Every structure is written in C-alpha cells, then in structure tokens.
Image (tube, helix red, strand yellow):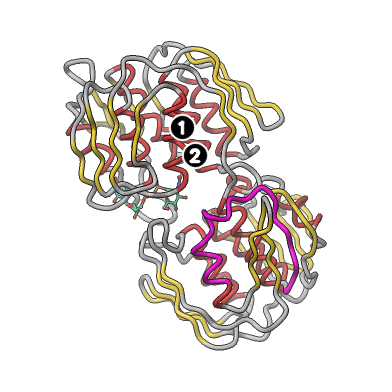
Amino acid sequence: MDNIRIVGGARLAGSIPISGAKNAALPILCASLLADGDHVFRNVPDLRDIGTMTKLLSHLGLETSFEDGVVRVRGCTVGDADAPYELVKQMRASVLVLGPLVARYGKARVSLPGGCAIGARPIDQHLRGLEAMGAKIELAHGYVNVVVPKGQLRGAEVVFDIPTVGGTENLMSAAVLARGRTTLVNAAREPEVEELARVLNKMGASVEGAGTDVIVIEGVDQLEPVDHAIIADRIEAGTYMVAAAATAGDVFLDHVTFDHLEALAAKLREAGVEVEREGSGVRVARRGELRATSATTAPHPGFPTDMQAQFMMLMCLARGRSVITETIFENRFMHVPELNRMGARIEARGRVATVEGVDSLSGAEVMATDLRASASLVVAGLVAKGVTEVLRVYHIDRGYEHIEDKLRALGATIERVPGRI
Ligand code: UD1
C-alpha cells in the first residue's frame, strides 16, 4: 500500500478548487435505485468510497459509468435486493441502499456494517423507522432482512432518539415512495441531508423541511430519473482551511458553500485565523500566533465531528491549553497517540482531549485507522520539522480527491511513495 511522504515547513499559498461532497454523493447515488431511466450525477469526486458505491449499484444490476466527475447510472428493476458483506465492510455508507430498496421492492437484505474504527455505529434508528413504516426486520447470519408484508411502506411519524445523518437519509429515501405522509422528528440537519432532499424533489418526490429537525414527506407513486450537480465538500474545504492556518499560509479555496462552514470559520477566527468569504470561495490566512481555542463537536450546525481531528492538530501549535470534546462518536481520538509521537502534548480521557500547545512538531512515520485522523496527520506533516510519512494512504483516498496534487499546487512538498510493508 502507498504512503504519503511530506517534507514539512512550506507555507501554503495560492488557490485550489474544492471537489464535490462525498457524503452528499453517496446517498444521492443510492437514490438512483428509486427510478428507472438514465440518471446523471455531476461534480462527483473520484474517491474510493464512490467506487465502492458504484460497485454496489452494479452488483444490484444497475449500469454505472464514471468519467471526468460524471457518474451515469441506468436505473432498472433489480434482481436480488441484496448488499453483501464484501462491499458493506469496505464502506459503512453502503447501508444507505436499504431505504431505497425497501421503498421500491418491499424487501432488502443488507449486511450489517458491524463495528468500525470510530465506534460501534449501530443502525438501530434506521431499522426502528422502517418498522414504524410497516416493515418486518429480522437479523440473521450478519445480515438484516427487511420485508414489507403489504408490499408498500406506509407513512408514519418517526422520532429519532438522536439526530442521525444516515438514518435520516435512509428513511427520507424510503418515505418518498410510501403510502401517505411520513414525519421525521429530531432529524439530522446536515447540508448533505438537504442536498438529498433537493435531488429527491427533482425526481418528483415531495419532501419539505430538510435542513430543519422536522422533515415531512408525502409519498408519491413513481419517481423520474435526475440530472444533478453535487454540492461542494465542506469537510475537504475545512481540512484545507486548517492546513492553511497551520502553515501560516494564505489560501483561496474555490467552489465552496461558505454557509456550510460557519461553525469551523467561527472557531478558526477565535484562534486568530483570518477567514473571509470571497465570491464563490473562502480565503484563509494567518499572520499572527494561534490562540488556544476549545471546541465541542455537535450535530450540524454545530462543530462537525469530521473536523475534530484536524482542528485538534491545529491546536497542538497554539499558545496555551485547549480542550476538545467529542460528543458524536465514542472512539474518535485515534490521531492522539500519533500526534504525540510527532511531539504534540495531548492527553485524552474518554471523550475529552486536553491539548497543550507546543512550539513545533517533528516529522515521523505515522498511521491512523480512519479517514479524518489520517487527514490530521497529513496536516501535521506539513508543519512538522523534517520528513513525515503517513502510512495506509487507503484511508485518505476514501475522502480526499487528488490530495497530493492539491497540496503541491499550494507549495507543499508532498508525494505518494510505495509502502515498504
Ligand atoms: C455520517 C457521515 C460521517 C459523519 C457522521 C456524523 C456519511 C457517509 N458519513 O455518518 O462522515 O461523521 O455522519 O456527522 O454521511 N447512531 C445510532 N444509531 C443509529 C444511527 C446512528 O446510535 O441507528 C449513532 C452513531 O453511532 C453516532 C451518531 O449516532 O454516534 C451519529 O451517527 P450518524 O449521524 O448516523 O453518522 P453516519 O450517518 O454513519
């Protein structure tokens, strides 16, 4: 497996475009299961997770192609509504086929995703919602079997125990073809949920309230194929914003929806970083010292858990002590021991990490077992003295399109090298 090798010390400067949002593209690709015909999805990032999703759709019998950021899917009636372990284990978001399959075919068999590196991540809320809509659920041999005895789901009121992004997306995609009205209460408000609703409505669905915590869906009989360009990836943008701040750089990120980045922008400003909305993008620069700034992750519009590792890395370089609290996932501090190996001073206890700023980090061989933790290590490598090698680049390729090219365009010394083990 390849590694990413970085020689630290360069101040990032210049301009790069931000890619389409992986987490918006995944549920939207699944929505192609809801209607026959030719779907076109534009601005799709070329990422491993997208490849896994198109493989899953192909496995279900849909024709897919991917060229120059455009995914074409020919929707058709699937044979077996079955998502095998082999694909689901590669990417938890495979479970997002569940809602569309059950809505369209009244049945589905999907491998349980199991635990993953950042916590248990159950899907009980997805299943409880489908049950409320009339589905029967059976768990056997590592699979969840869902059957709707009457063939068609019926609308229901579903109150989530916690706002879940995937759960909201799955139930929204199920409800669009259900009989009658579904109300999702305590729904996730993430921009990716709103984007999925936009696409479903373009397909002829009736979804109202996405982006708030109550979403109302009136079921319709049939949906049409769609042509849609995906929104920008706010987490990719956020990661480069942190990289610009960490290196005391001056960077313009183009094709960004600034409104999706408010919580991060506020924290960066608190830390002494200049963040300005400029036309279709955002400009991030740092001239002075970083101030220690505490942050607590929360569902949108709060501080995103997907930016926690990168922001913690930034705080390693700030003057003073900051406290980073993770409230969404129970095991999301895998970057802590690795950053400490690079000279950081972080103490993690349960869901709280206390960071004492240090003057500098030193390059090392490091490895993380999840996507955003790996991203934080790449940013750490950009500022560390000497050479950093981030192993298992696999994780980065799940979520960052052409990361070396983009960072190199901003002046970083970074390359992909063959791994030794
Ligand atoms: C999505 C994002 C992920 C992000 C996360 C939180 C995608 C593909 N992934 O993941 O990048 O970190 O939102 O913003 O969009 N939970 C339950 N029961 C359930 C569902 C969730 O207990 O049925 C818990 C999870 O374990 C977690 C919390 O709810 O602690 C939030 O999870 P959720 O919002 O569902 O995350 P994902 O959709 O998996």
Q: Which mark is residue 90?
A: 2
Q: Residues within 10 Å of mark 2 (few under 14, many from 20)?
A: some
Would you call the spot at circle 1 few (<14 residues within 10 Å), some (14-19), or many (20 or more)? few
Q: Is residue 132 found inside the magenta-colored segment of the image?
A: no
Where does the magenta region start and end?
A: 248-268
Identify the residue shown where x is 50% and y is 40%.
24
Q: Is residue 71 left or right of residue 298?
A: right
Q: Is residue 21 above or below residue 11?
A: above
Residue 336 screen position, x and y as percent: 51, 71
User: Does residue 135 appear to the left or right of 408 in the view shown?
Assistant: left
Say which amino acid is labelled 1.
Glu
Residue 327 in the figure: left or right of residue 419? left
Quarter where residue 282 is shown: bottom right
User: Are the residues at dot 2 and dot 1 in contact (C-beta closer than 8 Å)?
Assistant: yes
Residue occupying the far front of the picture: 279
Q: State the CA–CA distance, disc 2 to disc 1.
A: 7 Å
Say what secondary structure mark 2 lies in: loop
Q: Is residue 313 above or below residue 77?
A: below
Could you tell me which residue is drawn at 33 percent across and 18 percent down? 104
Amino acid type, label 2: Gln
- Give the SS element for disc 1: helix
Q: Which mark is residue 86?
A: 1
Q: Is mark 2 within 8 Å of ligand 1?
A: no
The x and y percentages for residue 157 are: 18, 37
Q: Residue at x 25, y 26 (%)?
A: 146
Instruction: Tell me if the residue at label 1 has its CB under 8 Å from ligand 1.
Output: no
Q: In which image quadrant can residue 331 be found? A: bottom left
Residue 211's x, y, as percent?
39, 46
Task: Judge left or right: residue 13 versus residue 132.
Answer: right
The foreground one among 158 and 380 is 158
Please say whether residue 265 is one of the residues in the magenta stretch.
Answer: yes
